[in-house]
Image (tube, rainbow, N blue to C red):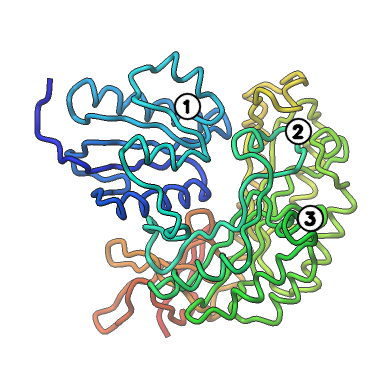
Amino acid sequence: MKTKTLKKNKVNVITLGCSKNIVDSEVMMGQLKANKFEVEHEGESDDHQIVIINTCGFVDNAKQESIDTILRYVEAKKDGAVEKVYVTGCLSERYKKDLEKEIPEVDSYFGTRDLPKLLKTLKANYMQELVGERLLTTPQHFAYFKISEGCDRPCSFCAIPLMRGKHVSVKIEELLMRAKTLANKGTKELLLIAQDLTYYGLDIYKKRELANLIDKLSDVEGIDWIRLHYAFPSGFPMEVLDVMNKKSNVCKYLDMPLQHISDNMLTSMRRGITKQKTIDLVSKIRDKVPGIALRTTLIAGYPGETEKDHEEMLEWVSNTKFERLGIFTYSHEENTHAHLLKDDVAEKIKRKRADAVMAIQQEISFKLNQEKIGKNFKVLFDKKEGDFLIGRTEFDSPDVDNEVLVKLKHDDYVRLGDFADVRITDANDFDLFGELI
C-alpha cells in the first residue's frame, strides 16, 4: 500500500562498480532528461517513481553489493516507496535469467547494450542525436571519458568480455566532438578510460591510434589535463609517451594493471608477457618520461599461486616502487578460463598476501610523499570538507590516489574546480598537506 505521493516520471539512477559504469549512467541520464524525465543520481529525496540500478558483476564483492542494492529497492517497492525498479549493467547482462528467477519483483532486467530497450520500456525515445551528451555525476570540472567498449584480450581470470563484448573503438572525430561539448560546459580534466587503452584503434583503423587520439584531444580548448587509465602492457604504443612529453596538458600519469610478476602466474593468467618484459617495459616508460606516476593493479591468490610466486611479487613491488598501487584478492568467475582451475588458495591466505603487498606499498608511498615536502605543485581542487579544500596533483586520479589538503585562511580565494599552486608542508602515507602560494 502506498504511504506517500511519488513524483511521476522522477527517476533515481544508482551506479555501482567502475568508472565505465559511471559514464553509462551519465549517458542514460542525459537521454532521460531529454525525454522530460526528472532524473537524479543516487538522490536522497524519497519521492522517486522509478529506480534504475546500474549493476557491477566484476568480482564476488561487487556482485553481492549489486544484489543487496536490488533487494533494498525491491523492499522499497513492496512498501510503496517506489513504483518501478529496473536493473541494468554488467550483473544483469551476465546473470539475467538467474536474476529474473531469483528476484522476480524487479520490473525488468537489461544488459549493458540495452539502453534503447530500457528507454522504450519507459515510453521514452532513444535520441541518436544525443549520443555523447551526458549528465555528469562527477564535479563539472572533471569527467571520465570512455574511448572504447569491451575487450579482445584472453586474460584467464576476467569476465569483462562476457559482460561487455568485443573491443569496439569510438572514432576519433566522435571523441573530439564529445570532448569539445564537455569543455564548453566547464570540464577541465578528461580521464580516458577503456577496458584496454592499448588496443584503441586497431578495430577501425587497423593500427594503434591512442597516441594520435591523445594528441588531438590535447588541442581541445579548455582541456587542461588528460589522464590515462587502464592500459594493457603487451603491445603498449610507446609513442603515447612522446605525446606525454610534448603536450603539457597530458598528465605524466599512466594506469597500467600488471596483475602479477611471476612467469608461472603470468602464463596461467594468459597475459601475453613475461616477468623480464614487464620489468623492461616499466624501465623504458620511466626512462622516456622522467617523473611519471605509474599506477598498477595486482591480484593475490590466483589459482596455483605458491608462496614462492607471492614472495616474487613482494620483492618486485619492493624494488619497483610504483607511485600508486592497488591489489585485489582473486575471485573465481564462472565461464572464465581460470574457472577450469582449482581455486586452491584459501581466502584467509589471499587476504594475508594482499595485505603484505599493501604494507610494502604503504611504506613506499610514505617515502615518496616525504620527498614532496617543501616542493610546489599545481593542484586541481575537487571538494571542500570542513576548513579544508581537497585537491589533486597531475600525479593523482580521483578516489584512488593521494589527495592534497589545504586549510583555508580567511583571505584565501580559490573555488572548487580551480587550479592553484600549492607548497607541500607535510605528508603521510597517502595524503599531502599544503598551503596556497
- Viewer-closest of 247 and 324: 247
Write down the residue under mark 2.
156
Write down the residue under mark 3.
319
Q: Dot 1, how many residues are within 10 Å of its Cα: few (below 14), some (14-19), or many (20+)?
A: some
Residue at x 79% of width, y 35% of height: 269
- Check residue 64 in the rendering and tell me which mark sits there, or answer none: 1
- Viewer-closest of 290 and 69: 69
Residue at x 78% of width, y 21% of height: 341
Q: Position of residue 241 (x, y in %)?
A: 74, 71
The secondary structure type at the circle numbered 3 is helix
Distance between the Cα atoms at labels 1 and 2?
22 Å
Which three-letter amino acid code belongs to the residue tagged 1? Gln
Q: Position of residue 121 (x, y in %)?
A: 35, 34
Q: Which of disc 1 and disc 3 is earlier in sequence?
A: 1
Which three-letter amino acid code belongs to the residue tagged 3? Asn
Q: Dot 2, how many residues are within 10 Å of its Cα: few (below 14), some (14-19), or many (20+)?
A: many
Q: Dot 3, how many residues are within 10 Å of its Cα: few (below 14), some (14-19), or many (20+)?
A: few
Judged by depth in the image, the label closer to the viewer, 2 or 3, is 2
The secondary structure type at the circle numbered 1 is helix
Q: Which of disc 2 and disc 1 is earlier in sequence?
A: 1
Residue at x 27% of width, y 30% of height: 84
Q: Position of residue 318 (x, y in %)?
A: 75, 52
Q: Position of residue 251 (x, y in %)?
A: 61, 72
- Viewer-closest of 89 and 255: 89
